[in-house]
Image (cartoon, rainbow, N blue to C red):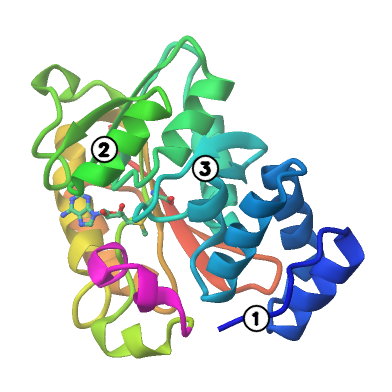
């Protein structure tokens, strides 16, 4: 329990957060001060919540993703900057008046980025969690609730230019390695990808050709050796050899695959 008064100047607040182990203490203190907008009681409550490890976006209700302001409701997965390159690549593959599906949309962040850059396109989102669906709707997206492709309108079949997805892909045995605070506040629903993490990835690879047009793009976030684990399924589903997407440290972050003609 924190008994000291919460400072309301940027330097002292960021020092307090740094002292509590927050790596981006300066940025977080700026966000908290902007959120409180001079209201000391609000700031006090917000900082005390943050110190318990509650996600900052659940406290402020917002996060910036690819430069787009995203509403994030409590209990909804907070979009990560690690997913931004995938979202940007999805924008590049989406024609001006094309159609995209954002599977496992969470807050609807990727869908919102696609709509911001392609206002003439149709962007459809879905998630199994009703709280995520409500949040995505509040972010302005056409959204459906259900398991992967199941709830999507049938008129999309064979017509979609881009399927993009950040599905749960953490191998079950690696869940305990996630950040200390993760499961104090979040559920495994957003993370647990089964024994090797590919349970949902394989299902999306197998089901996506029904919705994509020939030449359409499948963009999936994944990690480790999961691209290799999916290689056979991708070929069988009719995809050309995928491009493996890596970050500046050359760590694998995703795949981009194009459906054959
Ligand atoms: C890692 S989060 C990604 C959210 C969002 N795409 C983002 O990057 O911010 C995974 C999401 O998948 C959803 N999910 C889990 N299982 C699902 C399923 N069977 N069908 C649809 N969505 C599912 C969770 O509710 C969660 O919102």
Near mark 1 (Cα within 10 A), the count class, few <14, some 14-19 or many ≥20, is: few
Q: Is mark 3 within 8 Å of ligand 1?
A: yes
Q: Quadrant of the N terminus?
A: bottom right
Q: Which residue is at 74% across, 68% downward?
A: 6
Q: Which residue is at 43% across, 29% downward?
A: 139
Please tell me which residue lies in front, 81 or 204: 81
Q: Is mark 1 within 8 Å of ligand 1?
A: no
Quarter of the rendering containing residue 199 = bottom left
Q: Quadrant of the C terminus?
A: top left
Q: Secondary structure at mark 2?
A: helix
> Which of the numbered marks, if any, corresponds to residue 87?
3
Q: Relative to 246, is 39 above or below?
A: above
Quarter of the rendering containing residue 260 = top left
Please tell me which residue lies in front, 174 or 129: 129
Q: Earlier in the sequence, mark 3 or mark 2?
A: 3
Residue 52 on the magenta span: no
Q: x and y percent of residue 95 in the render?
A: 48, 19
Q: x and y percent of residue 235 in the render?
A: 24, 56
Residue 188 on the magenta span: yes
User: How many angstroms separate mark 1 from mark 2 (CA)?
Assistant: 38 Å
Q: Which residue is at 62% across, 50% downward?
A: 42
Q: x and y percent of residue 129 in the render?
A: 20, 49
> Which of the numbered marks, if any, corresponds to residue 133?
2
Q: Which residue is at 33% across, 83% downward?
A: 175
- Along the horizontal axis of the image, is 79 left or right of 16? left
> Which of the numbered marks, if any, corresponds to residue 3?
1
The span shown in magenta is: 180-192
């Amino acid at each position: 329990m924190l008994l000291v008064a919460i400072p309301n100047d940027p330097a002292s607040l960021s020092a307090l957060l740094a002292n509590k182990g927050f790596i981006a203490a300066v940025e977080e203190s700026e966000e908290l001060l902007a959120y409180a907008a001079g209201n000391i009681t609000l700031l006090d409550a917000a900082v005390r919540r943050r110190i318990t490890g509650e996600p900052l976006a659940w406290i402020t209700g917002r996060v910036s993703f690819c430069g787009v302001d995203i509403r994030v409701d409590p209990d909804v997965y907070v979009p990560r900057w690690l997913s931004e390159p995938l979202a940007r690549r999805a924008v590049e593959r989406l024609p001006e008046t094309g159609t995209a599906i954002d599977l496992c949309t969470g807050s609807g962040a990727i869908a919102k980025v696609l709509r911001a850059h392609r206002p003439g396109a149709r962007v459809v989102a879905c998630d199994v969690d009703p709280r995520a669906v409500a949040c995505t709707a509040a972010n302005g997206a056409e959204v459906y609730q259900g398991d992967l492709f199941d709830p999507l309108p049938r008129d999309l079949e064979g017509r979609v230019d881009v399927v993009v997805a950040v599905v749960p892909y953490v191998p079950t045995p690696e869940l305990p390695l996630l950040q200390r605070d993760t499961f104090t506040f979040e559920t495994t629903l957003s993370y647990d990808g089964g024994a090797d993490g590919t349970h949902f990835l394989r299902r999306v690879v197998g089901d996506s050709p029904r919705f994509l047009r020939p030449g359409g793009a499948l963009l999936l976030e994944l990690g480790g050796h999961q691209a290799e684990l999916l290689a056979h399924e991708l070929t069988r589903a009719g995809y050309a050899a995928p491009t493996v997407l890596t970050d500046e440290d050359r760590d694998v972050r995703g795949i981009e695959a194009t459906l054959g003609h």
